[in-house]
Image (tube, rainbow, N blue to C red):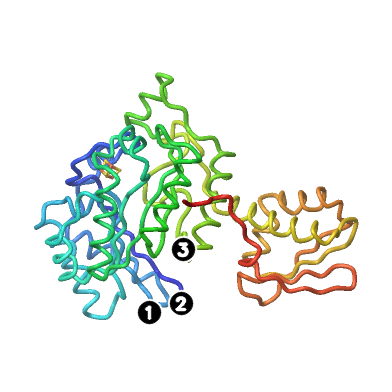
Amino acid sequence: MSKINIIPIFVPHLGCPNDCVFCNQKKIAQASTDVDKSFVKDRIEEYLSYFKDKTNTEIAFYGGSFTAIDRDIQNSLLQVAKEYKEAGKVKSIRLSTRPDCIDEKILENLKDHLVDTIELGVQSLDEKVLELSKRGHNASCVYQASQMIKDFGFNLGLQQMLGLPGDSKESCYYTACEFKKIGPKFVRIYPSLVIKQTSMEKDYKAGKYKPISFDETIEISKELVKFYELNGIEVIRLGLQPTENIQLGKDVVAGPFHPSIRQFVDGEIFYDIIYNFLKDKNITKEEVTIFASNKNISNISGQKSAIKKRLINNLKLKNLRLTYKDLDENHLILSYKDKIEEIDIRKLIKTEIVCD
Ligand code: SF4
């Protein structure tokens, strides 16, 4: 299937009943209250003019709590999207909202407006983390909303955050296990950042909140990505949302800010697979060539060739060549000594997350 072309429409805090400790959307909303139907139409037209392949295009209402917005405003925005979908100019519509802003009437309205996918900003299923983050709802609300969304036939996406107040590796893993039970189609993972003008910023400055480190973020994210993929749940994003209006040094006060966290995580996953594969076969002090897709070559190489250098050093290889071959992303071919072996990386992925 062709790549989805997303038309992002950022709907700020409009109508959100809450004030989560990490969220600055009230601040953003003050600066941008101009999301109305003509804005939506202009945005769609603008993006459609960029896309060469228009066959798989999705309108995505990001940010805020879409279904908490006044119903007339919701419908005026959705109506524009619906007309584009009915005209065959876009293929699908998605939006994100809070778990406590879902009920049958809301879902019926979204069905009437031809919405396909609903993402819930869950962030954690640990009650303590939800409370300390001032999410304003408990975990059971998430299970109920998710079930309703699935029963209505929408695609369900769940968002998870790492490093919230009271969070730990164990509570992140617990949330992942609970997500598996819920069975979303996809997840997004966001490491918590301390953003200006949030309660988290105050707590950070008062020494009451310590952000998750970059290394912990990579370590936990690596296990989460492997876990979700092994369980058939796609991780469609790891890191920052491009529309979140977050810029290092401008809005981010502290936290594991990096625009390419996913590449770090994928690199670490490849490192483990290749290291263990060659180590198990006692391949050291050899010349090794790995044939892979372009995307995998860049993951195995890593930022500034860091992953490749670690493989060479830790396995004491004479050389490690990375060569393009027309392979899918689940396969690599390794050549060493007089052997050539094709490996299915999905069969070699192991995760330390164990669910009850
Ligand atoms: S529910 Fe979403 S929009 Fe509302 S305060 Fe929390 S993070 Fe921000």
Local crowd size for mark 2, using a 10 Å CA cut-off: few (<14), some (14–19), many (≥20): few
Report the residue at 22% width, 59% height from top.
39
User: Seen in the image, is 33 located left or right of residue 340?
Assistant: left
Mark 1 vs 3, N-terminal side: 1
Report the residue at 76% width, 49% height from top.
310
Identity, as a three-letter code, of the amino acid under mark 3: Glu
Local crowd size for mark 3, using a 10 Å CA cut-off: few (<14), some (14–19), many (≥20): some
Identity, as a three-letter code, of the amino acid under mark 2: Ser
Mark 2 vs 3, N-terminal side: 2
- Image coordinates of residue 249 in percent, x first then y, are 47, 34
Residue 116 has which mark?
Answer: none
Q: Ligand 1 falls in which quarter? A: top left
Residue corresponding to mark 2: 2
Report the residue at 58% width, 54% height from top.
351
Q: How many marks?
A: 3
Local crowd size for mark 1, using a 10 Å CA cut-off: few (<14), some (14–19), many (≥20): some
User: Seen in the image, is 320 located left or right of residue 43?
Assistant: right
- Image coordinates of residue 63 in percent, x first then y, are 29, 50
Q: Residue furthest front?
A: 356
Label 2 sits on a secondary structure element that is loop
Residues at circles 2 and 1 in contact by the CB criterion of under 8 Å: yes
User: Seen in the image, is 315 located left or right of residue 172?
Assistant: right
Residue 234 has which mark?
Answer: 3
Residue corresponding to mark 1: 55
Identity, as a three-letter code, of the amino acid under mark 1: Thr
